[in-house]
Amino acid sequence: MNHTDAELLKQIADMDGVPEGAYNIRKDGGLDSRRSTDTIEISSKEDKPGIDIRIKAGTKGQDVHIPVLLTQSGLQDLVYNDFFIGEDCDVDIIAGCGIHNDGCDTSQHDGVHTFYVGRGSKVRYTEKHYGEGEGTGARIMNPHTIVYLEEGASIQLETVQIRGVDHTKRYTKVEVGAGAEAVVTERLLTHGEQFAESKMDVILKGEGARTQVISRSVAQDKSVQVFYPQVEGDAPCFGHVQCDSIIMGQAKVSSIPAIVANHMDAQLIHEAAIGKIAGDQILKLMTLGLTEEEAEQKILDGFLR
Amino acid sequence: MLELKHLAFSVEEGAGQKDILRDVSLTVPDGAFWVITGPNGGGKTSLARAIMGLNKPTGGKILWNGEDITDLSITERAKRGISYGFQQPPRFKGLRVRDLLGLAAGNPFLSRTEGCQLLTQVGLCAADYIDREVDASLSGGEVKRIEIASILARKSPLMIFDEPEAGIDLWSFAKLTETFRYIHDKREATIVIISHQERIIGLADEIVLVADGLVSEQGPREEIFPKILANTQPGCAFVGEEGQA
């Protein structure tokens, strides 16, 4: 692993060297390194690129790191990762994709992650996307995240894409079973002429299913963002969608949340707001001794924290 | 020492201009506790904001420790030790109370204990607030107290508070007046408070009455306070007459 790889890993997976526990590092379209444990087994798929991660029932307090690195300019990588999480688990899964593109060809990573979360299991899933490099080649990422939550299961799904990704079309689908809960948090910052689209479908299928969708984004320069978060309630359930965007420069943001009730006892709420940084926020931080630029940065850091 | 010399501030209004401050000259000695009071719309907040640099005066000068700061930016004034507690503090999505206090103290690693001490000084139960976001989930009175704590965190030589009592319950208010008294007793800073509250006015060395963009009265508390009380009309005169008829 060279310095660039190590830096990318730090950015996307908070990894300092090889992590403890189970991990799988994919680099430039192939396997870089892997470790399975007694309770978490990682194996390559035989019919298509990608891996299966099988977590034994009752596994608690363990992490799985599955970062992807793209360092060859012009590489187009498509990968399918399936997670089979047994009943009564409590695990952290840290994924992420870092593209370092110094060339002039487009580098693209399309990851399809599917989670089958067993009864009563708790999963925290973090996915960070990061792009860097001096080249003119575009950095493209199109992640798909599909989650099936069995009865009483829960997932905290956190996706972060701050800077560096030129074009992204993200799709997230969560099917929430009875008594299960999905908390979906998305944080996004685009700049330059970047484009980001995020579509989400959260389907509350069983009685007592709950979801909270929180999307926070900052669109700078001439970047464009489009959001389509949708929550559907098919049973007595509760869903809340909150979309907040800060718009700057000549950016454009569309926020199109939808709530669909197919049951009389589905309680669904959506809130969406787009606005620039409030002037008095900047002034307040300036009265604490920050410059205008520092104040703006602090406000954005807090908003995307 | 803070000196205001013939300070004027006007805003464009329709075709003409509205004079908010006409000609205000004041000299606040170091370590003093001054209260600026007076009717609503008289120019008190504009005066305080002009000192902080949030309003640009249309005439006159502001001197701080002998230096002309009239043309300095807000940031530069802050760095020279001037602080201002907003009348209506802004809220921030995502910024936690400890983050704000850390920025105010100029120490991003402000310890939990230090943050909690500041909150206690403004009558907030620290453990409940230190990790909360300074967003719309806080009540007006809570945001106001966090705002005051952010000024205390700065430990600056000039602290200006704009109606610190607004929206604060009686119990927290008692704690707050105690804090102001403590700072003053130690002569740690020059305190200028815009207030209508008797208990705050009662702490002042000097009272300045600002009305219609001018200083209409100024003097030691013992002298000015009785005058203010005497001139206060209880209730509305019109209703009073009607009631007697």
Image (cartoon, coloured by chain):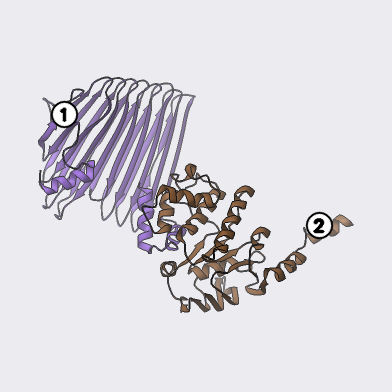
Chain colours: A purple, B brown
Which quarter of the rendering shows the C terminus of chain B?
bottom right
Residue A56 pos. (x, y %) = 23, 21
SS at circle 1: strand
- Identify the residue at image location x=31%, y=46%: A188
Q: Neighbour class for label 1 at 10 Å: few (<14), some, many (≥20)?
A: many
Q: Chain of mark 2?
A: B
Q: Quadrant of residue A98?
A: top left
Q: Is residue B173 positioned above or below B217 on the image?
A: above
Q: Residue furthest right?
A: B245
Q: How many marks?
A: 2
* Residue that badge 2 annotates: B239
Residue topped by disc 1? A51
- Image marks 2 and 1: residues in contact by CB distance under 8 Å: no
Q: Amino acid at mark 1?
A: Ile
Per the model, the C-alpha gap separating discs 2 and 1 is 82 Å
How crowded pointer 2 is (Cα within 10 Å; few <14, some 14-19, many 20+) is rated as few
A82 vs A302, left or right, is left
The x, y position of residue A209, in whole percent, is: 41, 25
Is any atom of residue B104 visible in this view? yes
User: Mark 2: which amino acid?
Assistant: Val
